[in-house]
Image (cartoon, helix red, strand yellow):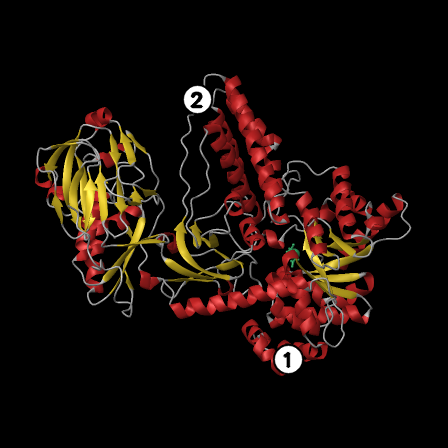
Amino acid sequence: MVTPSQLELLAPLSGVVLALDDVPDPVFSSRLMGDGVCIDPTSQMLCAPLAGVVSNLQHTGHALSITHDSGVQVLLHIGLDTVNLQGKGFIAQVEEGQRVEAGQPLIEFDADYLALHARSLLTLMLVISGEGFQALAHGKAHIQTGQPLLHVQVHAGKGDGATGHEDSPVLHSQAVLLPNPNGLHARPAGVLAQAAKGFAARVQLHRQHDSANAKSLVAIMALQTAYADSVYLSAAGPDAEAALRELSELLSQGCGEEVEHVVLAPDPDPVAHDEVSDGLRGVCASTGSAFGYVVQVAQSALEVDEHACEAQREHAALQHALARAADELQGLRDNASNPAQRDIFRAHQQLLQDPSLLEHAAELINAGKSAAFAWRNATEATSALFKGLGSPLLAERALDLEDVGLRVLKRILGVDDRALALPDQAILVAEQLTPSQTAGLDTRKVVGFVTVGGGATSHVAILARALGIPALCGVSPQVRALASGLPVLLDADAGQLHVQPDVGQVERLGAQRALREDRQQRDLQLASLAACTLDGHPVDITANIASRAEAEHAMTLGAHGVGLLRSEFLYLDRSRAPSHDEQVATYCEIARAVGTEHPLVVRTLDVGGDKPLAYVPMASELNPFLGMRGIRLCLERPQLLRDQLRAILACAGLTQLHILLPMVTHLSELRVARQMLQEEAQRLGLSALPKLGIMIEVPAAALMADLFAPEVDFFSIGTNDLTQYTLAMDRDHPRLARQADSLHPAVLRLIAHTVRAAHAHGKWVGVCGALASEPLAVPVLLGLGVDELSVSVPLIPAIKARVREVQFTACKALADKVLALESAEHVRATLQPQSLVLEH
Ligand code: PEP
Ligand code: MG
């Protein structure tokens, strides 16, 4: 007879009932995991002994637990040491989280396979959360599936330590890499839960963003941990410290299992939390902030056979893989939400067609190598070459090549490339993320990322900005030792990753984020309004672009035209120069997107020592930023410039065409280029020349602006290079990034000087470096008299909004004030919105 406070459990199998004392395994016979019965099965279908929810189904299929509505939990464990079978011999009939009825089939198992491969078939039914029970069938009795087997006392409100001590401070342990070959499966989970119950404190076990009550066997099993997973504990209550100490030790010793210590491939210098408690520093690759949980991303090595028997087959395999990779990239392009992503995948598609790569791979296949080996060899050799040239830009290309190489290699090897399964609020931590990984990120789950490698100008940084998620690059390798699952606060604006931040910090940044998002929405709605200060001073807000798609996007966001078309995009990532027709087609497409009402400023090729071209032999340089770059290279190879000018001129009638020369230092450079432009225009029979301007990015040009001004139509100030040359700081240097600040008064003085000289000769001045895209800098640039701000496409609405909020007269006073300051920090402090209120 079942009383109201009792629950009847049915036999989950047919077989012979044994007492737990007879189970030849101390973890079960000692009742460490719970009390119950054991059945030596004669059937092969495990059925539910009671109704409830499948609260945990081990991924290896050998064990599950059911939680009844009353809270009673029952663990069913088929065989002994069957976790080692890794799922072989088990077919689950239910899913985790599913509600089941008493008697419903749960797991089918192959008794013959288990008999041969596991220690024993003895199957346990343990009551792990209940108040004691009465067995209805006793030792050696035969029982059939579905017959009543136990009566369990339903407990009333007995706490399991999951609550309580809410007011106590929460302490955290260091991360532990699980040494258990099968993670915390039933046996070690039972040992941990039992040990945790010995403490009064509330104890939680964490892995990534998941956490479990460490006193609950089922909850621990439900974490589905695996070997080398990084876990940590938190505890609150009177004996929290002791609990953390002892339970961490237990975890690292394997919770009663014989284990060897985990050896990790990457070099994780164990990080003591106090070492990073002030936060890890890096370079802001994409602005914003996010609170989330560390997810360490590692790339697993692929096994490749070197030799193959049939070259024909290998050629076909490579072709097939290349075609599939190209299709995938097309899919990524089609689904990309913004032009920057599309451009990167277009570049990847081009790499797939690169003749020298394909020839290299084909030669190796003809020499008896497998397709995988040949392809890997070809991509690795080229990428090593790129890296060895000492150029940051080519190192970036090497990363693209490796990314594409891996994509094709996986297709050849038939490796399943499913997207990384991610928890919510993931902050990815990686040595380096490939562009494919970055573009493929599920932004519903990934809220930010942090990499050891990469710089603010890397493709990955560009993608992060396009995706609108905060990112830090160039962070200390220590970050790789942070446990997955650790809570962190990524404050990309401040270049910092705070480990285990306090609630106040998280809330402060959260509030700022909400404000910023509101603002973005408002700015977007008003994007088509003119950019005119409160007192009626108009400023042109144009776009920095590198593709037709970006041009189109910019115009939809209210751009007044294009202030900088970086034409390098046509020349890089390829083994031959773009043909005349290809160039013409591209410039004309962009010109049409901009239209005849607006300006299009095409900058001539700005490549050189730091951005070498495969088809233009150049000596490698010790200091490429000070070498054959921009106009210097083009004048050394005049045909390159002449061809480009002719192609650009083809779109003269489609837009208000402007041509911009990069890296100009000497007046003679401008004069030679103008001469060339005149000759090409004449050859094409053009009556009017397009406007010709120079970039002001070499301090010499800024200082000589009064002599340049009469001979140009406009200036465009490249604050990225102007800053690096003025302050003598590499623009991509991770440790100098914070100092290489374009708001340094020295840079501002050069801008002021340039504007004065230009205006004296009736010429206009734009700023197209990254400073123009910084909302904080808008008032000072206006105050210095800049006429045009050419900004990164997504920021067009924000910069226009900023212009509409300020008084031109106040901006002028502000500019005078900051020019006299002593450092960039002082300038930034003065430009903070709260200081600006005083200026109005
Ligand atoms: C600059 O130097 O500021 C600039 C706009 O040119 P780039 O970033 O392409 O060198
Ligand atoms: Mg530049």
Q: Position of residue 307 (x, y in %)?
A: 43, 22
- Name the quarter where the C terminus is drawn: bottom right
Whether residue 495 sits left or right of residue 97 in the image: it is right
Q: Amino acid at mark 2?
A: His
Q: Relative to 307, does residue 66 appear above or below in the rendering? A: below
Q: Which residue sits furthest front? A: 1
Measured in 3D between alpha carbons, the distance from the residue under mark 2 to the one under mark 1, in whole angstroms, is 71 Å
Q: Measured from the top left, where is residue 354 in percent x and y?
A: 61, 33
Secondary-structure class at tag 2:
loop
Image quarter for residue 756?
A: bottom right
Please give left or right for residue 208 compared with residue 612 in the image.
Answer: left
Q: Tell me the amino acid under the disc marked 1.
A: Lys
Residue 181 image position (x, y, % from top left)? 26, 40
Taking the image in four quarters, ligand 1 sits in the one at bottom right
Which residue is depicted at the point 36% across and 52% down? 208
| Residue 663 in sight from this viewpoint | no
647, 189: nearer the viewer: 189
The vertical placement of 658 against 569, above or below, is below
Which residue position holds label 2? 307
Q: Closest to the observer: 67 or 768?
A: 67
**Label of residue 194 in the image:** none
Q: Which residue is mark 1?
A: 817
Q: Is residue 335 visible?
A: yes
Q: Foreground residue, 398 or 640?
A: 398
Question: Quadrant location of residue 95?
Answer: top left
